[in-house]
Amino acid sequence: MAQAVDICVIGGGIQGAGVAQSAALSGLSVVLVEKTGWAAGTSSKSSKLIHGGLRYLETLQLGLVRESLRERRTLLKIAEDIVKPNWFYLPIYKNSRHRVWQVRLGLLLYWLLAGWNNHGAFKTLPQAKWEELEGLNTADLKHVFMYQDAQTNDAELTRRVIASAEEHGATLLCPATFLSAEKCPEGYMVSIAINRQITTFKCRRLVNAGGPWANQIADSIAPKPPIPSVDLVKGTHLQFTEQLSPRCFYLEAQHDQRPVFVLPYQGGTLLGTTETIFTGDPDQVNPDSNEVDYLLETLHYQFPHFQYKPVNAWAGLRVLPAGHTDAFRRSREVQFVESDDYLAIYGGKLTVYRATAHKAVEVLLRSLQLADAATRPNMKPDTAFEIADTAQVKL
């Protein structure tokens, strides 16, 4: 029987792509399995932002913001043609959730966590220039801040990471439906279906990067691994053919004071997002009328003249820790679940996919090295493999 591959990754979104790339670059044999298409799920339905997460400062997720800003800096270098910086305009009104001094302090901290680099700097837009903001509602407007983050094509970024993984030796299986995995002495015996033909192979370590489908995947593994308590949170976006502005706007919804972005996108405009608990089938997630109304109400209040109809709408699912607080206040940190040659990745942000992959491969390598050391006592575990630096790999 053929020797088992080192790693089998289930899920062809940005997290699975990142793990496959990092593992392949580190010298491991990798199989990446995706049932529909690369970035077919959440990884193509985001706000298309590479950002530090300014709003996460409010919930004191300083480590995540620092990590995100570091990763933003790297992606601006290694994928400069599809990760582009842009100015974000943040208007503060009389009844805004935060006062001017609070936002100024937050932006100063954001700049500090960015390492005082140019892309972390912020400015104030003088009142004399407010009329240049594409018809922004200036009634009760107190202040307008400007700061920088970046935009990307999320699906294209994922595809490039996958292409890099393949270039460095990973085997790609798509479309391929994961059927089951059963524990065996070598690790796991994995069964998948390709064009209705069932194929089996062995892997030493199994990685569940199924995103919203992660618990469904876990249910098909024997013995069943631990399954954390999570919520699926739906985020809806609207797309317009007409471009409101080449600038990005960070707005506040009137209904619940949540952040809503208005972004230039494909020559038009992208508006999002919402945060609604979702309990259905992840394959059947769609925007609903309440979410569309919520986004349009926010847009029309801030830009009364922009009365165009959206030409497209989509919804993606975030995986967040289960809880009774609103989704905004829950941690965006990735969760790892380890068990018996198995690693599951729950949550994670597009911006920090490389950091998530590095941590995952670090766990996998440690496990493999300990196993190899047990069977080959003369081998030095700490030098058997070395995690590759993906910051040196152009996308």
Image (spheres, grey):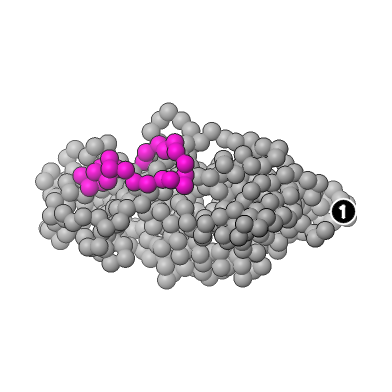
Looking at this view, name the residue that lies furthest to the front: 196
Please provide the residue range marked out in magenta: 275-298
The answer to if 367 sits in the magenta stretch is no
Report the side of 42 relative to 129 (left or right).
Answer: right
> Which part of the image, by quadrant, shows the N terminus?
bottom right
Q: Position of residue 193 (x, y in %)?
A: 63, 55
Report the side of 233 relative to 261 (left or right).
Answer: right
Q: Amino acid at mark 1?
A: Arg
Total labels drawn: 1
Q: Say above or below: 171 vs 59.
A: below
Q: Position of residue 296 (x, y in %)?
A: 22, 47
The quadrant holding residue 285 is top left
Q: Residue at x 18, y 56 (%)?
A: 308
Report the side of 378 relative to 14 (left or right).
Answer: right
Q: Say above or below: 150 vs 168.
A: above
Q: Position of residue 383 (x, y in %)?
A: 76, 58
Q: Residue at x 74, y 49 (%)?
A: 189
Report which residue position mark 1 lands on.
376
Report the side of 161 relative to 224 (left or right).
Answer: left
